[in-house]
């Protein structure tokens, strides 16, 4: 199979594994929200933050450098493998012994046991990590997808089983550890034929890989702080229970968009790359991607906005009503986020990924003071609004950069987005009338609301955007 065909096949498997893993994550949260207190989700969210922070240092960009350099030297790979194991042990010690500081910041004693248990993650992943990088290098995406799906299924099953047996916040941590143990075992099994480590360690042989990783770590740190500053401040300022509500609202309104949108962009990137020297075609393709993203996301998000008060009790049960206003704020965050995301492919196509770094830096400078200011004044709702404002500012800067890269596009963008926005407003109007005159509580009313909204959007799309016949013809030609 050619590299091109392997990449296309790999894209399909990545899509499948991403969708399946996202569904498992959604089901896990939906089921456990009925069993666990909001504070439990806040405690686990803190441990996840700590893990994600130290994961930035975990491979020093080795995955990118191994793929970029097409590294195959057994001595170099062995050195990278043992450096990874050493790094994992060091990070384990740092996380384990940092638990008192984390407990003091969040004022939550339960975090001590959770952080110490979660630190074991770094003793697990490094045994299989290099095999994952080599599988990526060799385009073995089917194997990677199987590992992701099996791991997600195992982790979800363990977490739900333990939660129903009274393990509370530890159920989620044990679930994550079970997932990573199985993934690591499968990485070794699938990757052993690509590499068998020998007892060899030379820092001089991997200095190019280490240099390659420094920028990745710096960019990753900035992205982490920019993306998680709201969670850090919510927990420290308002406590883990408020963080639990915030986390659940985020996972319903924002998390799926952050996981599923990259699938569209992954398909779009090769198309843009072929047009990098044709400014007009590049602009046209970028606008088409924005149009596609708008039509995919807006009906889902608008539907969530108007049905949140019906959906939340059905999904999570009683006690989660505080998430409803947060979800409605996050709906707008998701809309602005999905409109800014296509710049990533455009920036890489034009060979200017450094622009993304500067956008993140500018957003962070604005976001952190807003979080503290609005959080102190309006608590968790204020922090959600600060997140929204910083996302709007990010989008404005984003569009300015797009204008710099491909020229004036905003008029065409407004013309394109007018349809999905107007269709969405009609959805809101129709569902609001149904809720006012008929009702909104219970499964039947919620299902009818979804049918009404989805039916209106599809009918308007077939009438004014693209007919069903055209959609089927496009699918066959794709």
Image (cartoon, helix red, strand yellow):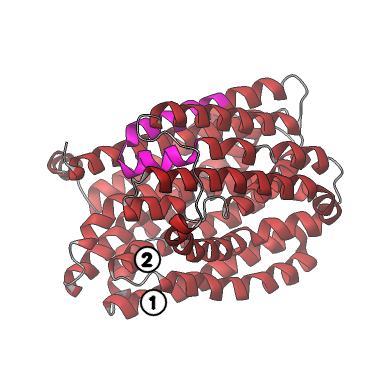
Answer few, some or many: residues within 10 Å of disc 2's Cα (few below 14, many 20 plus, some between 14 and 19): many
In this picture, residue 173 sits left or right of residue 278: right
Which residue position is annotated with label 1? Answer: 401
User: x, y percentage for residue 109?
Assistant: 87, 43
| Location of residue 342 by image quarter | bottom left
| Location of residue 363 by image quarter | bottom right
| Location of residue 124 by image quarter | top right
| Picture residue at 65% right of the left edge, 67% below the top | 386
Magenta-span inclusion, residue 345 = no
| Picture residue at 75% right of the left edge, 19% below the top | 165
User: x, y percentage for residue 185?
Assistant: 51, 27
The span picked out in magenta is 128-154
Magenta-span inclusion, residue 143 = yes
* CB atoms of marks 1 and 2 within 8 Å: yes
| Picture residue at 17% right of the left edge, 39% below the top | 472
Of 20 and 463, the residue lying toward us: 20
Disc 2 element: helix
Dot label at residue 343: 2
User: x, y percentage for residue 211?
Assistant: 47, 64
Disc 1 element: helix
User: x, y percentage for residue 392?
Assistant: 52, 69
């Amino acid at each position: 199979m050619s590299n091109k065909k392997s990449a296309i096949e790999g894209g399909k498997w990545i899509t499948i594994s991403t969708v399946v893993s996202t569904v498992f994550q959604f089901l896990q949260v939906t089921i456990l929200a009925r069993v666990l207190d909001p504070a439990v989700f806040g405690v686990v969210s803190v441990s996840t933050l700590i893990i994600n922070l130290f994961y930035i240092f975990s491979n020093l960009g080795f995955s990118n450098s191994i793929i970029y350099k097409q590294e195959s030297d057994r001595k170099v790979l062995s050195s990278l493998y043992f450096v990874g194991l050493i790094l994992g042990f060091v990070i384990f010690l740092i996380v384990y012994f940092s638990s008192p500081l984390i407990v003091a910041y969040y004022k939550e004693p339960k975090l001590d046991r959770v952080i110490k248990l979660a630190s074991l993650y770094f003793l697990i992943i490094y045994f299989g990590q290099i095999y994952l990088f080599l599988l990526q290098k060799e385009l073995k995406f089917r194997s990677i997808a199987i590992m992701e799906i099996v791991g997600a299924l195992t982790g979800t099953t363990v977490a739900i089983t333990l939660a129903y047996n009274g393990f509370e916040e530890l159920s989620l941590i044990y679930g994550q550890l079970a997932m990573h143990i199985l993934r690591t075992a499968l990485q070794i099994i699938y990757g052993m034929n690509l590499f068998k480590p020998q007892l060899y360690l030379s820092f001089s042989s991997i200095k190019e890989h280490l240099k390659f990783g420094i920028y990745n770590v710096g960019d990753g740190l900035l992205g982490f702080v920019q993306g998680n500053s709201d969670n850090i401040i919510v927990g420290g300022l308002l406590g883990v229970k408020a963080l639990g509500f915030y986390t659940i609202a985020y996972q319903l309104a924002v998390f799926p968009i952050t996981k599923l949108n990259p699938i569209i962009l992954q398909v779009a990137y090769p198309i843009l790359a072929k047009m990098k020297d044709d400014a007009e075609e590049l602009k046209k393709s970028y606008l088409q991607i924005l149009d596609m993203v708008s039509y995919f996301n807006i009906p889902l998000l608008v539907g969530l906005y108007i049905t949140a008060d019906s959906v939340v009790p059905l999904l999570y049960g009683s006690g989660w009503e505080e998430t409803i206003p947060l979800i409605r704020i996050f709906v707008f965050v998701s809309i602005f986020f999905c409109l800014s995301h296509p710049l990533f492919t455009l920036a890489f196509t034009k060979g200017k990924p450094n622009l993304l770094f500067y956008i993140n830096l500018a957003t962070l400078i604005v976001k952190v003071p807003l979080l503290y200011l609005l959080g102190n004044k309006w608590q968790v709702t204020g922090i959600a609004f600060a997140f929204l404002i910083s996302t709007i500012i990010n989008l404005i800067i984003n569009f300015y950069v797009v204008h710099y890269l491909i020229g004036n596009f905003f008029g065409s963008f407004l013309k394109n987005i007018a349809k999905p926005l107007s269709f969405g407003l009609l959805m809101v109007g129709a569902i609001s009338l149904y809720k006012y005159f008929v009702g909104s509580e219970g499964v039947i009313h919620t299902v009818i609301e979804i049918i009404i909204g989805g039916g209106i959007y599809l009918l308007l799309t077939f009438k004014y955007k693209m007919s069903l016949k055209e959609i089927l013809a496009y699918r066959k030609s794709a």
